Amino acid sequence: MRRTTSFLTSSVGRKVIMALSGLFLSSFLVIHLYINLFLFKQDLGHEFDRYAEFMATYPLLRPIEIILFAGFLLHAFIGIWLWLMNRHARPVRYALHKTGQTSELSSRIMWLTGFVIAAFLAVHIKGFFITSRFITPDRSMYDIVAEAFKNPWTDALYVVALFFLGYHLRHGFQSSFQTFGLRHERYRRLIDWVGAIFWLLIPLGFAAMPLYFLWCK
Amino acid sequence: MNFTLKIWRQKNRQAEGRLVAYPIRDIPPDASFLEMLDVLNQDIVSRNEEPVAFDHDCREGICGSCGLMIKGRAHGPHQGVATCELRMRNFPDGDTIVVEPWRARPFPIIKDLTVDRTAFDRIMQAGGYVSVKTGQAPEANVIPVPKANAEEAMDAAACIGCGACVATCPNGSAMLFVAAKVSQLALLPQGDAERKVRVERMVAQMDAEGFGNCSNTYACEAECPKQISVEHIARLNREYLRAKIQGGP
């Protein structure tokens, strides 16, 4: 027990929790994107609505929903804690510190990209999850989505937020493997390729949806 | 060559510090950065003022004493060198050079550019050793060491403990230093017996000293004068996870 608690409060342990919760949240993106791709199917949202209905009513998904929210809160909470601790570790800043020459910007602004994603999620969950589940449960999910994405400002917000998500994952995905101790020349290219799916393809796929409803519908 | 130096001057641990500008003239391009500071100090002393305090010892890049933040880069803009190996020809003539001490809470400033790095010593005392009974030295070739392991252990052992990794890390993390020490001993059969307790104790001491948390920016690898790879940090993470999961001594 002592070993477990000292693990969770150690700097390496906190990193592992960040990495695990981050990968867990990333895995949700895959499922989310898969279902959302049915928005493009030319059946007036019939299939998409069937999936949305299943997601909203299947009882086994309720605990998973709670775990997902808890995972997000854990990731955000430890992220903020780490950010505060790291600021504390350097009380006097350098007059000149050329961080841009030694590290990637994406790795240094995880707190900022993370904060933007959290703010976006609040809007996103209000707009779709809460609206469809509690405010207008009779409307089809497809209609809610189509109406929301007719607004160019909403679309712009989504595209910008997804850019931040991609930038967050650009560092986050490969970084988690370093944290698990799996960084090795042998796996480097595999991690980079799978990473590109997460930080490039998935945000692009999501961003295509508001633009599709704006321009093609 | 002529330069304008902006150097952090601070009387003692408690005093407020500030950047002070010093013009310096006729420096040979092949002078090392520390030799240039020697010339500056000679000049300051001749004016009956207090010379700039800075750490230095071997002046050939192997002791880890020197270490300055030069123009926003740990050990200056040149890669793979310590401050003593940096030459003035690496700067354009007439350049303004900002010189600051390492900045991190566990490295308090003693005076001007010298910082207290005993936090590193305490991390080493926590587990950066192999316990052996004294007596006759055993025959070296009795314990076989695979060539690849010997090479990697040697790469990690190149760490001179200068603190550039902490200084450059946006988080003030000491992971590369601790990783180099853990990795070096974990790769060798002599260090195997204590590998679990070593990594646990060294990480605990690192955290207790108040270093920041590693967030994998890899700035440390870019600035390390011995170019130690962050793959050693991956090994430290692996060693730590194994120690916590498997348990036992």
Image (spheres, coloured by chain):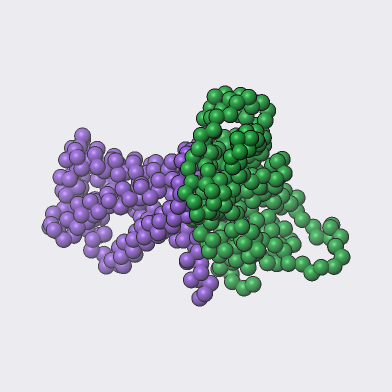
Chain colours: A purple, B green
Where is the N terminus of chain B found, in terms of image quarters? top right
Where is the C terminus of chain B found, in terms of image quarters? bottom right
Residue at 44% in and 55% down: A88
Residue at 77% in and 56% down: B145
The x, y position of residue A175, in whole percent, is 48, 50
Q: In the drawing, does residue B56 fall left or right of residue A36?
A: right
Quarter of the figure with residue B235: bottom right
The x, y position of residue B212, in whole percent, is 49, 55
Q: Is residue B80 above or below residue B114?
A: above
Specify whether residue A185 is in view.
no
Front residue of this view, candidates B13 and B45:
B45
Front residue of this view, candidates B13 and B152:
B13
Q: Is residue B134 above or below residue B102?
A: below
The x, y position of residue A11, in whole percent, is 50, 60
Q: Residue furthest bottom?
A: A1
Specify whether residue B119 is in view.
yes
Residue at 60% in and 66% down: B201
Residue at 47% in and 49% down: B16
